Amino acid sequence: MKNKSPTGSEIIVAGAGIGGLAAALALHARGAAVTVLESASELAPLGVGINLQPEAVDAIAELRLRDVLASFAIPTSQSLYLTQDGIELARRTFGGRVQQFSVHRGQLQMMLYEAAYKRLPEGSIITGARVTGFEEVGDEVVVHTAGRDDFRGAALLGADGVHSAVRSQLHPGADPYLWEGTTMYRGTCDSDTQFLDGRSMVLVYGENGTRFLAYPISREAEKRGRSLINWVAMLPEHGPAELGDDGTRNIPATAADVVPVVRGWGFEWLDIEGLVAGSHDVLRYPMVDRAPLHSWGRGRVTLLGDAAHPMYPIGANGGSQAILDAMEFARNAASDVDMGLVTDVADALHCYEGERRPSTTDVVQANRRLNATERAIARRAPDELQEMSASGEFDRIQSAYARGDFDAI
Ligand SMILES: Cc1cc2nc3c(=O)[nH]c(=O)nc-3n(C[C@H](O)[C@H](O)[C@H](O)COP(=O)(O)OP(=O)(O)OC[C@H]3O[C@@H](n4cnc5c(N)ncnc54)[C@H](O)[C@@H]3O)c2cc1C
């Protein structure tokens, strides 16, 4: 049995989500001692579809988990951007070294959890420990939790998601969720048919301003000749508004809420109305982000992922950016030379932030611009869309986003 010895130089991670677990694995691989505090009493495979961009897939490979990921995730072959009438606006293909995966978020989280459970010393991941606050005392951070004792470490990484308690303490005061005015519905359909090559992602722009995204997320379903299709319908309702601090809630909905919006939608190869009508676990939630912070952390405490930079789910980047944060955090915070010894913690965290805050701020802003462009597309007349297709304008915008050339969007 592996036993965990408290070193006093441990890095404490708040949250065993995608970013927190990736950070724990990356820190451990570099010889640092880690304790992960997770509020849920048990980790369960929650959520639906999520995408991993090529850079995040490389990070998963660095964590020696690429083969495991490939055993249950769908390697996306292409992203196809179409109007409701089937006019192709853009197409991005994947393959070779540039690979994107579509995956069930819960399966991804469980993959990371199982790897962390096996690799880290026993007792490194503590569930039922909701972080409520922290204080720096001398060269330690004392982390307070609800229902558990305090934990002491050399640093605290707030990977506690969109309702981050660590962020609230670091940045008290008004920090509202900013609603872009679009309401999103999300669901999955266990379909007996696969569309196109069974590995494509398709985004359809409707004449009523609605956008509809669909992609398969399960290799297991694929092996049975079926397709577990994740979809998101984005309905423009009004202009921007503030939603206060509770703006990210998923509200249970039904397929019947969405069917009228996509009535008659589809192509020969994809029955969109039928897909929605045959779906379960439908949720409604607002498209929100938060204003980018001018700094993430202070001293021995910093943030990662949704806690640091909640973003619109445009461009499918939320999970990927959390994983990239995790890798960069580990590169800075763990010393692979001194195996487990953290040297100048505040400096290391400052360097991490210097690497990741500007680039994630760019992604938050690029998502806003891409979203505005996409909303506008849905309002264009058919002849304008034909012209846009012929000119390759939207293809250029999507390629610029994929390259990270955000000024060109
Ligand atoms: C239940 C759930 C379902 C989701 N479903 C989807 C989905 O279907 N599609 C999609 O694109 N994105 C989904 N997301 C969001 C997605 O996981 C993130 O946008 C992205 O992966 C960034 O990861 P993260 O590590 O920053 O945050 P998350 O993956 O959200 O992880 C945050 C973790 O912190 C824990 N936590 C929260 N507060 C505290 C606290 N005070 N103390 C300790 N632990 C705390 C949470 O329980 C969670 O495990 C979901 C998130 C959650 C939590």
Image (cartoon, rainbow, N blue to C red):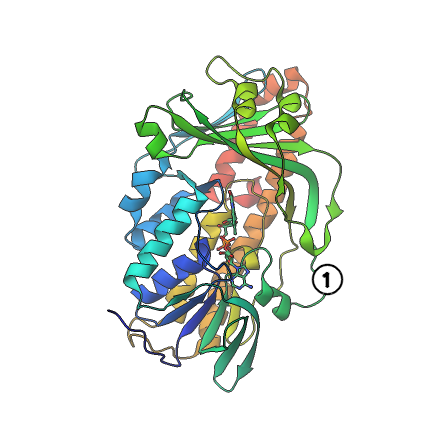
Q: Residue 50: percent from the left, percent from the top?
A: 47, 41
Q: Secondary structure at mark 1?
A: loop
Residue designated by label 1: 174
- Spot the residue most to the left: 1
Q: Is residue 2 left or right of residue 346?
A: left
Count how many numbered circles sit on residues in the image.
Answer: 1
Q: Residue 153: percent from the left, percent from the top?
A: 44, 77
Could you tell me which residue is drawn at 50 percent across and 79 percent down?
141
Could you tell me which residue is drawn at 32 percent across and 66 percent down?
28
Decide: few, some or many residues near mark 1? Use Cα within 10 Å; few <14, some 14-19, many ≥20: few
Q: Is residue 318 left or right of residue 236?
A: left
Quadrant containing the C terminus in the rendered view: top right
Residue 284 vs residue 99, the one in the foreground = 284
Give the quarter of the image for residue 31: bottom left
Q: Is mark 1 within 8 Å of ligand 1?
A: no
Q: Is residue 241 above or below residue 163?
A: above
* Residue 385 visible in the displayed image: yes
Quadrant containing the N terminus in the rendered view: bottom left
Residue 152 vs residue 54, the one in the foreground = 152
- Spot the residue most to the top: 268
Q: Is residue 280 above or below residue 174?
A: above
* Residue 231 visible in the displayed image: no
Q: Is residue 288 above or below residue 146?
A: above
Could you tell me which residue is drawn at 43 percent across and 46 percent down?
106
- Amino acid carrying mark 1 in the image: Ala
Residue 191 vs residue 371, the one in the foreground = 191
Q: Residue 285: percent from the left, percent from the top?
A: 63, 41
Q: Residue 71: percent from the left, percent from the top?
A: 29, 40
